[in-house]
Image: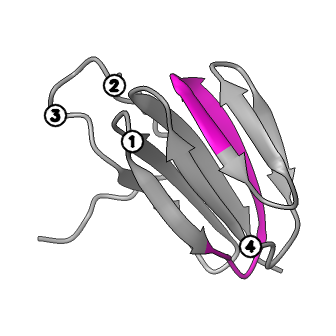
Amino acid sequence: MALHHVAAGEKVRLASVASADAKTSALVKSDAFEAVQLVLRAGDTIAAHSVPGFATILCVEGSVTLDAERPVNLEAGDWVFLNRGERHSVSAHEDSSLLVTILFE
């Protein structure tokens, strides 16, 4: 089954990590832009990687460490910007939800 991507103007409610069925989901993907809700459970890690565009990460819920040029702890409401191709990893300290956006040029 194909993933449902959001249409322009379509409202989306991000799943809360308190919900047992909360999971990572692609919201929008186009040639120019991608948005993903990333759900991590406490103790989850994402190995070092990079993306080909500029990225922003908004911590919606929980607490994570983003390790890029230097480690940054993110809690609900914290936002960070990454340069194109910047290597980074993520470690969740508690159940967490991140809104990740990538802008391709």
Q: Amino acid at mark 3?
A: Asp
Element marked by disc 3: loop
- Viewport quadrant of the N terminus: bottom left
Reading the image, the residue beneath label 1 is 39
Element marked by disc 1: strand
Residue 87 numbered tag: 4
Report the residue at 38% width, 47% height from top.
44
Report the front residue among 72 and 100: 72
Classed neighbour count for the residue bearing mark 3: other residues with Cα under 10 Å, few (<14), some (14–19), many (≥20): few
Mark closest to the chain's N terminus, 1 or 4: 1
Mark closest to the chain's N terminus, 2 or 1: 2
- Looking at this view, name the residue that lies furthest to the left: 1
Label 1, label 4: how far apart the Cα atoms are:
20 Å
Classed neighbour count for the residue bearing mark 4: other residues with Cα under 10 Å, few (<14), some (14–19), many (≥20): some
Classify residue 87 by image quadrant: bottom right
Classed neighbour count for the residue bearing mark 2: other residues with Cα under 10 Å, few (<14), some (14–19), many (≥20): some
Residue 22 is one of the magenta-drawn residues: no
Report the residue at 60% width, 71% height from top.
48
Reading the image, the residue beneath label 3 is 21
The answer to whether residue 6 is visible is no
Evaluate if marks 2 and 1 touch, with contact meaning CB atoms under 8 Å apart: yes
Classify residue 39 by image quadrant: top left
Q: Amino acid at mark 1?
A: Val
Residue 63, percent from left and from top: 56, 26
Element marked by disc 2: loop
Choose mark 1 or mark 4, whichever is in front. 4
Q: Which residues are the magenta region? A: 49-65
Residue 78, percent from left and from top: 75, 26
